[in-house]
Amino acid sequence: MPTDDVIDPGAIAMPQIEAKGFSFTYSGSSNPSIRDLDLEIERGEFVLLTGPSGCGKTTLCRCLNGLIPNFFAGHWEGEFRVCGIDIAKAKTYELAKLVGHVFQNPENQLFSLSVEREIALGPENLGLPRDEIRERVEWAMEIVGISDLRGLAPYELSGGQQQKVAIASVLAMRPEILVLDEPTSFLDPKSAKAILETIARLNEELDMTVILVEHRLDLAARLVDRVLVMNEGELALDGGPREIFGKAAHLMGVGLPKVTLLFQMLREDGLDVGIPIMVEEASAILRELLN
Ligand SMILES: Nc1ncnc2c1ncn2[C@@H]1O[C@H](COP(=O)(O)OP(=O)(O)OP(=O)(O)O)[C@@H](O)[C@H]1O
Ligand SMILES: [Mg+2]
């Protein structure tokens, strides 16, 4: 939980994530990677962040944990607050307690000789008492379903298991916000599904805000509450998955759930029977047509 000294007293009533007219240009670049962003995200939302390569998704994730502007040099304008904290004034460690970040490749995130030691690293760095560290490690392993892997070294694990360890390590910090930047891109479809379902469960059970950058839209579309589509640094679309995938997203070079794409093509071909975002919905439409 955040401590009183880092939290703005007015933060309780504020959106958990709030950007106002925020732009960021990396040092040496001539174009901003985020342009005039206005965004509010409330506690407990499950947000999918998508858009074409280079549109600024990773850059936005770096703002959420304060790597921008504290670690990546550049020029910024406007305001960006996370849990009431202005990222331009925050110390990186303050935001590290509030925002857990899971990267694309879990190998880059795992250093220890055992799963258990790995997950204990974060809480140890927070200087927590030994009992609390043990309790958090057990809790994190259990919630992600990797308690049986505790004694293994990260290099002995599959990609999917490693990604679960990376998520558990982040959860042991008890973050308020979980940011995952393409967490399944190195995984097979079955492991990817398991990871995304675990994330959805964390969102639901712990009321943890989740910001997910993900290309597997067939899986993600059914799980998320809200979809943000970025394009050339701008927030181009913001809405529910049905609204976004059912309408203009294909115009922006954004992937669509395959079933959505199929029904969009059918509509262009003159068969307008609705635009499903899940296979079950497509089945219902087809059954209706056949009856
Ligand atoms: N460290 C950096 N220094 C300078 N420019 C950068 C840096 N990181 C990203 N950029 C630039 O910022 C823009 C947005 O990049 P970003 O990595 O945020 O895109 P992305 O949406 O995550 O792309 P992808 O889907 O390929 O991961 C790109 O033009 C990129 O070249
Ligand atoms: Mg990226």
Image (cartoon, helix red, strand yellow):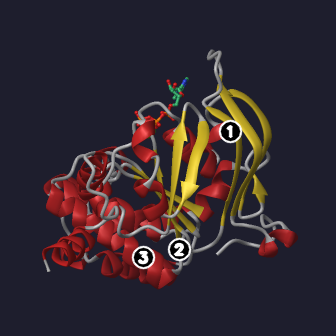
- What kind of residue is marked 3? Leu
Distance from Cα at disc 1 to Cα at disc 2: 25 Å
x and y, in percent, of residue 137 in the image: 39, 76
Mark 2 residue crowding within 10 angstroms, few (<14) / some (14–19) / many (20+): many
The amino acid type found where label 1 is placed reads Asn
Residue nearest the observer in this picture, 100 or 262 = 262
In space, the residues marked 3 and 2 are separated at their CA atoms by: 6 Å
In the current view of this chain or complex, which residue is farthest to the right?
Answer: 10
Q: Up-down: is 55 above or below 190?
A: above
Residue 165 seen in render: no
x and y percentages locating residue 215 in the rendered image: 33, 48
Name the mark on residue 15: none
Residues under numbered marks 3 and 2 in contact, where contact means CB atoms less than 8 Å apart: yes
Residue at 14 percent of width and 56 percent of height: 156
Q: Residue 258 location, x and y as percent?
A: 24, 53
Q: Where is residue 157 in the image (x, y as percent from the top left)?
A: 16, 58
Give the residue at mark 1.
70
Q: Is mark 3 on a helix, strand or loop?
A: helix
Identify the residue position indicated by label 2 in the image. Answer: 208
Position of the N terminus, as image quadrant, is bottom right
Left or right: where 11 falls relative to 95: right
Which is in the foreground here, disc 3 or disc 1?
3
Label 3 CB sits under 8 Å from any ligand 2 atom: no
